[in-house]
Amino acid sequence: MSTLVIVGCGVMGRAYAETLLRSNLRWRTRLVGVCDSNPEAAEALARETGARAFTDVAEMLRVTEPEAAYIAVPDHLHADPFFACIEAGIPVLVEKPLSTDPGTARAMRSASIDAGVYAECNFTNRSNPVFTTVKSAIDRGEVGEVIGINSRLSNSIQYPTSLLRWAADTSSGWFLLSHVFDLTTWLTGARAAEVTATGIRRVLKSRGVDTYDLIHALVRYDREMSGLYESSWTLPDSLPSAVDFTFEVLGTDGAIYVDTSDQMVHVAGRTSYTKPGTNNWTEARLSQFLDHVEGSARPDDPLGEALDNTLLLVALHEALETGGAVAVAHRDDALLPTTLSER
């Protein structure tokens, strides 16, 4: 049985800890340590899982000697625990986005390659049965050549105002559009070339969270294809689902329509109406990562597309700030920007 540690005991860290406890993975992998800068959060998750609690990543790695690590700290804090794991020779699954800084993302990819330590970014929807079905349909040519993507991925306002204490340090772009940008890359193989965007800061700013309420982005790709994306963090909490996710693929010979908020189960109670999710792909995602750690079907450049994803998101936020079209850098460019100001 392999061993794994989790860095970050928030929403995603707890979700993956529960997966390890309640799925078939409990026969394959044992959670031996959980770490969080908040000792109460670490201790609470440790009590629930039987793992040891830590507040220092290096100490946890030294004491538990795990065979793999999952990093689920806030978007802008991925680098330090990532480098600690790489230096200790521990394979890493790090939450998306890889980093909110392009130079740091480049350094993370280079560190993994140079050290020969396996690492990949957790774009969970690649393991979502809904989207594996979409990919199969595209690969079979059922819609012809893909010429357009329309997607909306939004959260109710509870996410930035109560669930994510660090929401002011990120945006729905980093937190949500990273998913749909990656899905477009994975499903079509297209490379982003240019992005234009507009955003609104009003509701959240008035509530003390200085980030975007709403982002609209238009991405032009390196072929005859474009993508139109929307992300909001201010949907009402009264909605039956806290996540509103639609994804449309437009092809030369057909189209595909996905609405993940409706998974065929609707529950109407006395005072509430909900649409509980039936697709839980965390087990499939974690199982795939463990297969890769063991050497099975590893991707050639596991952090390459994650770096490209960060570069597109950097360009998106520059477009939001400037109001103009911004060219998107690529992992193979000779000179990648290290900070937003260098663009």
Image (cartoon, rainbow, N blue to C red):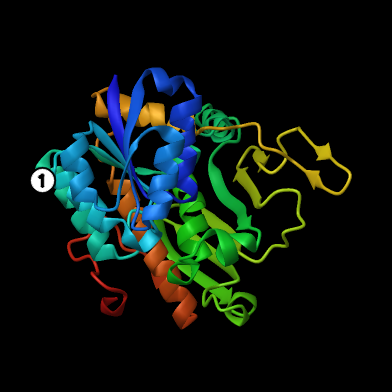
Residue 205 versus residue 38: which sits nearer the camera?
Answer: 38
Task: Name the residue furthest left.
Answer: 114
Q: Position of residue 170 (x, y in %)?
A: 45, 67
Image-based side of 186 in relation to 304, left or right: right
Would residue 313 be seen by someone viewing this image from the given angle? yes
Instruction: Give the residue displayed 64% in from the left and 64% down from the top.
Output: 157
Residue 342 x/y as whole percent: 26, 77
x then y, percent, for residue 201 = 58, 78
Q: Specify the quadrant of the image occupied by residue 336.
A: bottom left
Residue at (54%, 43%) from the top-left corner?
146
Question: On the image, which quarter does residue 216 sit in?
Answer: bottom right
Residue 333 in percent (x, y) is at: 22, 60
The kind of residue on which mark 1 rests is Asp
Q: Quadrant of the C terminus?
A: bottom left
Q: Is residue 97 visible?
A: no
Asked if residue 318 is positioned above or below residue 141 in the image, the reply reads below
For this rendering, which residue is in front, 164 or 35? 35
Q: Is residue 114 above or below residue 220?
A: above
Disc 1: which residue:
114
Q: Counting other residues with Cα less than 10 Å from the Cα at mark 1, is it few (<14), some (14-19), or many (20 or more)?
A: few
Answer with left or right where residue 277 lies relative to residue 5.
right
Residue depicted at x 55% and y 58%: 163
- Exactly how many numbered labels are in the figure? 1
* Residue at the extreme right: 270
Q: Identify which residue, 342 or 211, lies in the foreground.
A: 211
Please name the residue shown 28% across and 46% down the image. 303
Horizontally, residue 160 falls left or right of residue 89, namely right
Where disc 1 sits, the SS reads helix
Q: Quadrant of the N terminus?
A: top left
Q: Is residue 180 above or below residue 92?
A: below
